[in-house]
Image (cartoon, rainbow, N blue to C red):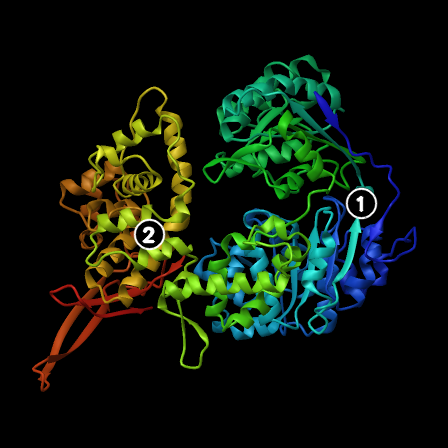
Amino acid sequence: MRAFTPINTAPKQIIGKAVQSAQPPILTTALPDRYRSIFKFPAFNEMQSICFSTLYQSDVNAVISSPTGSGKTALFELAMLRTLVSENLGNFKIIYIAPTKSLCYERCQDWSARLAVLGLKFGFLTGDTSAEEVATVKQADVIITTPEKWDSTTRRWKDCDRLMTLTKLVLIDEVHILKDLRGATLEVVVSRMKYIAPHARFIALSATIPNAEDIAEWLGQNWNSRSIPAQLYTFGREFRPVQLDIYVYGYPARTANTFQLDKLYDERLADVLNAHFAQKPIIIFCPTRKSTVATAKILAKTWMKSREAILACRMDPGRHFQDYELDDLSKSGVAYHHAGLSLQDRVMVERLFIGRKILIICCTSTLSVNLPAHLVIIRGTSAWIDGQVQEYTEFDMHQMMGRAGRPQFDNSGVAVIMTTRDKQSKYEQILCGQEVVESCLHNHLVEHMNAEICLKTINDVESGKGWLRSTFLYVRMKKNPAHYNIGISSPSRSIEDILDQLCTENIVRLQESKIVEVSDTNELVATIYGRSMAWFYIQFQTMLNFMNSGTGMAISDILTMLGQSSEFKSLRFKNGEKKFYKEINGAAGIRYPLRVVDIKDFGAKVSLIIQSTLGRVEFPVYDGSGKHVAQLHADKAIVWQNVQRLIRCVVDCKIHSHDGVSVRNALELARSLQAEVWDNTANVLLQLKGIGPATLRKFLNRNIQTFADLASMDILSIESALSLNKGRGMQYLQDVETIPRFGVTLKALGETRDRSSAVKIAVQVSVTLLNKTVVKTYNRKLLTVGFLMELSNGNLVDFRRAM
């Protein structure tokens, strides 16, 4: 076992800003009284004091690279205060962008509590934001969001000009995620904001990285001086208020098998604890929910029993967890924490850990960012992420390590990373801040260029080259062109030649596929397909499949096409899964069974995941099937994350091609996907609270199969059908009233014939809401009414949407 430890004794260095060797602390009394109250300390630390004048007393853009736990959040707050000084409340918007919903949520909770005294209103905008929350966000002064959601919002920015005009400050947290898979989204959204909100100020914070000056060059000093880099500060680990020692332990591993690696790490965990135990709180990050429980049990039975510290960690009498295994383990001073526990149990674990009644938490990365510990152990550098085993990103690593040695809780901290020997040097490099941040934009450049053409940011090759010059990709291409492998055939080629090639090739691809076309004024414009591709976040190859699909598609054809989307390529069959899915394929709830020989690729897997969900299929039970059920649920999360967008894009494509049959079937499938049950089946009643399979069978015995059937019953009939006590049937009628029910009437107003003998018929269609009260939302989402009219030959006559 070989360990690497960054030593915190190097002289302090601040790169990018000439300052005195020792910066005296700036007291919070330097701020007006009403601003001072938001800080719970009397003076800013050295790092914050060095940045104070730039953030609070100027309007230039800034990039600050500093270790986790060094107090970077206060820097954002100083920039926000500067905006309050410069602008009248209600006349500006501040946008905060962070990589994850959990980080956005915690920031929203913290700022809403502390900064509300300043009169600021906060809005939380993520992929899960409801219709009510969207309305709240429009009234907010500070909008807290993820790169993906803000990208989706700004792709529609012409619909919210005022929002963009009011944007005065953009706060970018963890900007070093530019090098991760999701970094391209952050890159394009910031580049877009530089265009659509040119007077906005940008403040970007990062963990320690070696090329922070590239990010400063990308952002520029301000809207009027883009060619001058933003103000840059780079702080070393020695600026962390609480010293954090980091150890990377590499173990020889003969296999990449997750089970074997879990066993290896658990065997070595006692050695790590013995080396770093200080009788202070310990957090151990595990890759899966199951491993948090297994590791906690091992520690409770072995390591904890041999220590006197156990006496100080016993549970108070009378306190009990809902999870019986957790309740038992907690009496040994050990607990586990994951998203599968009830909120009540998770909150109690965190509270008892802070109160030192629990010494060790074994958890997944869902643990609260603000929960402090002395020792953090990352037990393995791979985890179950988005339905598959993936390496932790640098952002994940820094977030987990950041729990160790938090200011106000401890005077030192220790972080330990357990990994395999072949990956040890990689993590040593990351944690020293030696891994260069590269752009990922080139991997999906064609999709992003199409989005910019839709927004008129790009209208020809020259403006395309101009847009590319505004990206981080351009900054890094100039310095490391070989990394991007973009067809550089000769070392003598200039960056302008490469830029021209990139633009031309991607624009030609979009034109040849009819996603983009040239207007009469020789400008690039998106076709309906290009707009749908940008609007619904569709990958290029997926869009080509939708455009080139046949006419008159049945639901089974649409399912097959959806399954083949590039968005699902990660959902490959794993060891033993084909047998599991073949049994699902034969279940009664599968409406469109596949041929057994076709169950071989990710498309078949996606189709069966969708059908088993909509058909409420009971999963096969045999030795070892449980792990496949767990994997299916994880894969389903990925499918549902994408399929709603995909099916809406299919609808738009088929409307454009006047394919009435395909539109009708796509709409039916879309309704089924939204409800997670097949439309026009009795299972639709399962959407109501309190109705499970047993209750459904009782309704079916009374021939109650639809919402309208249930709405027509009285309370006594419901109570009789379900054998309920008097008064218990009212809830079912109240619930069904939240489901909109419509009546449709059509009246012919007359017909005419033209010289070609074509008949034109004028009709009047009336859509009536049958509910007793007006229903505008369901499950916190706005409702729309779709009206479709097609001819007997399948051609689409008309399609409209209305609120």
Q: Amino acid at mark 1?
A: Gly
Q: Amino acid at mark 2?
A: Gln
Q: Residue at x 39, y 30 (%)?
A: 574
Q: Nearer the viewer, residue 340 or 489?
A: 489
The CA distance from mark 2 to mark 1 is 49 Å
Decide: is 538 above or below 199.
above
Decide: is 797 above or below 293.
below
Q: Is residue 731 left or right of residue 8?
A: left
Point out the image quarter for the C terminus. bottom left
Decide: is 28 above or below 331.
below
Q: Provide the secondary structure element on which disc 1 rests.
A: loop
Q: What is the crowding at mark 1: few (fewer than 14 residues within 10 Å), some, or many (at least 20)?
A: many
Closer to us: mark 2 or mark 1? 1
Q: Estimate the x, y position of residue 407 in percent, counting from the top left.
A: 77, 42
Q: Estimate the x, y position of residue 482 in percent, counting from the top left.
A: 62, 50
Q: Estimate the x, y position of residue 572 in percent, counting from the top left.
A: 39, 36
Whether residue 209 is visible: yes
Decide: is 660 above or below 442.
below
Point out the image quarter for the N terminus. top right
Q: Residue at x 86, y 39 (%)?
A: 10
Q: Which residue is mark 1?
A: 236
Q: Which residue is mark 2?
A: 674
Q: Nearer the viewer, residue 487 or 129?
A: 487
Contact check, label 2 and label 1, Cβ < 8 Å: no
Q: Earlier in the sequence, mark 2 or mark 1?
A: 1
Q: Provide the secondary structure element on which disc 2 rests.
A: helix
Residue extending furthest toward the left: 757
